[in-house]
Amino acid sequence: MLKTSHPTGQRDADKVNLTDTNKLALGEGFHQDARVANLRLMVSPLGKRSWFFYGHAPSEGKSIKKKFGDAEVMSVKQARDEVKRRDVQYGDKTREKVGEVPTFDEVVKMRDAGWLTRTFAKHYSDWLPLQLDAIDAAMVREREAQVRKVAGDESRRRARLADKPVPVDPGGTAVTNAAKALRSVYKYAFDKELYKGANVGKVMTLAGDRTPRKVWLSDKQRKEFLAALDNWEENGLSNWARPCFLLQLWTGTRWGALVKARWSDVDLDNKLWTIPAIDAKNAEPNYVHLGKSPMSGSSGRRSRS
């Protein structure tokens, strides 16, 4: 077995391709997984076997060593998934990359987004154990047709029961959601340098690729909305509601990103608001130019926020 330096410099660790069989046979000491660099199996002098995460947090400028599971109960795959999740959590860019192409299940868990997990469980549950390079364009088009048919049939059924017209593109919304989920997984794996192939999710059709959404407030609705904000006390709103809703109206920012905004992310001098990747739906930094928006004159509220 190859000897490698321990990240914290405390001791050497055997580097071995851990399996559910050999994890129970390895002797006392630390054993580094050959596939996921920050995973360690620790075997105590009494034979107790525990999983450890050994990584580095650039934001904190320090190494991290944390026990996270009982190796006799938690499988090797579960331990690897947990370490990959922590790699993303701590932003460790220095870890060794896993040479093997990840599975959909691994990437979905690393991405750790509720909407993505639900969409894959609904439309791609049979693909979860497969590696990303196991899917080709023909398989994606076939899955798109299946999603469109199932969702379309359900949409027509509901329209008949409600005595309403059948949508122009029944099943189109479901296909769009499925396409966004598949594209997101490939893009995330590519950005994290876990996969270098094509994003086959792009062969699926997004509703927006055909007809852009057109949603806006009429002049009457806009005036009613602003009037309600001006009388926020009478309408039972909190004092922070007016600037928040005005900022959302001005910038079109997602509500989830808005309520997580921090003053440290706002540059009032340059009128720029940076939404960190961790708060953005696409997991990438977003830059919002404030201009004459409500936040550009909000410095007086900073001390009270």
Image (cartoon, rainbow, N blue to C red):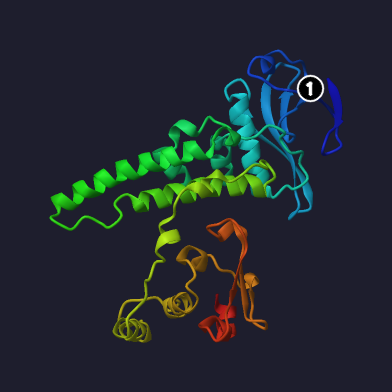
Which residue lies under the disc numbered 1? 29
Measured as percent of width and height from the top left, residue 53 is found at 70, 36
* Pick the front one: 62 or 156: 156
Left or right, 91 with reference to 213: right
For the view shown, which residue lies furthest in the front direction? Answer: 138
Residue 233 shows in the view: no
* Pick the front one: 154 or 119: 154
Quadrant location of the N terminus? top right
* Pick the front one: 177 or 62: 177
* Pick the front one: 281 or 24: 281
Q: Residues within 10 Å of mark 1 (few under 14, many from 20)?
A: some
Left or right, 276 with reference to 257: right
Q: Quadrant of residue 300?
A: bottom right
Residue 158, relative to residue 123: is it above or below?
below
Mark 1 secondary-structure assignment:
strand
Residue 243, relative to residue 154: is it above or below?
below
Residue 105, relative to residue 266: is it above or below?
above
What's the residue type where badge 1 is placed? Gly
Quadrant location of the C terminus? bottom right
Residue 61 shows in the view: yes
Q: Quadrant of residue 276?
A: bottom right
